[in-house]
Image (cartoon, helix red, strand yellow):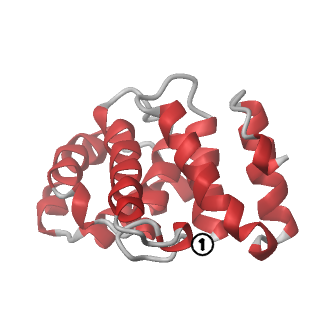
Amino acid sequence: AAPLVSTLHSQGMANLLWAHAEADVQAPELVNALAPVALRCIGEFSIEGLSSLAWSCAKLQLNEGPLMGAIATQVIARHACDSNEGTPPAAGLRGERVGPRELTILAWSFGTVAEAPEREALFETLAREAVPQLRSFRPRDLSQLVWTFAKARYAARELF
């Protein structure tokens, strides 16, 4: 799969890495090929793709490279850009609805990583996105979100 990575679109890259993470298959050659391509086109990923990519990296313990930092930066930048234009928080990321599931996945992914660039700013962004949607969360997702915030030692009082 590694030689074909450069031919994949963003969703294809997210799906490929997710499949390896879900099957718990370590594939260093694939990751070495995928990371630079994903970094070059990080702005093309949907929120679902970004959350899938983050989950896959966390599950495969690929937290040392620049990819997790780029994902966090992308989420924060999209939220800031849309927030400044008056877009409601629930539609914060590039006009996409950031649902409870994606918020939970992003929080878990970065909460399991001890050190990640932009981690605190990302948790602040996720909290701002989550609060207006709290009633939309399934109980499992809400409990996982709150647990992750507590585990990451990020005190978002509005969530508790």
Residue at the image point whose x is 66% and y is 57% from the top: 104
Residue at the image point whose x is 50% and y is 76% from the top: 97
- Provide residue 43's location: percent of width, then percent of height: 23, 60
- Against 81, is 99 above or below? below
Instruction: Give the left or right position of residue 140, taking residue 35 as reference.
Output: right
Tell me the SS state at disc 1.
loop
Q: Which residue is mark 1?
A: 99
Would you identify the image quadrant in which residue 3 lies?
bottom left
Would you identify the image quadrant in which residue 148 lies?
top right
- Provide residue 133's location: percent of width, then percent of height: 70, 70
Instruction: Give the left or right position of residue 9, taking residue 92 as reference.
Output: left
- Provide residue 62's location: percent of width, then percent of height: 43, 35
Residue at the image point whose x is 32% and y is 30% from the top: 65
Instruction: Give the left or right position of residue 95, taking residue 21 as reference.
Output: left
Q: Nearer the viewer, residue 39 or 31?
A: 39
- Against 65, is 6 above or below? below
Q: Nearer the viewer, residue 127 or 7?
A: 127
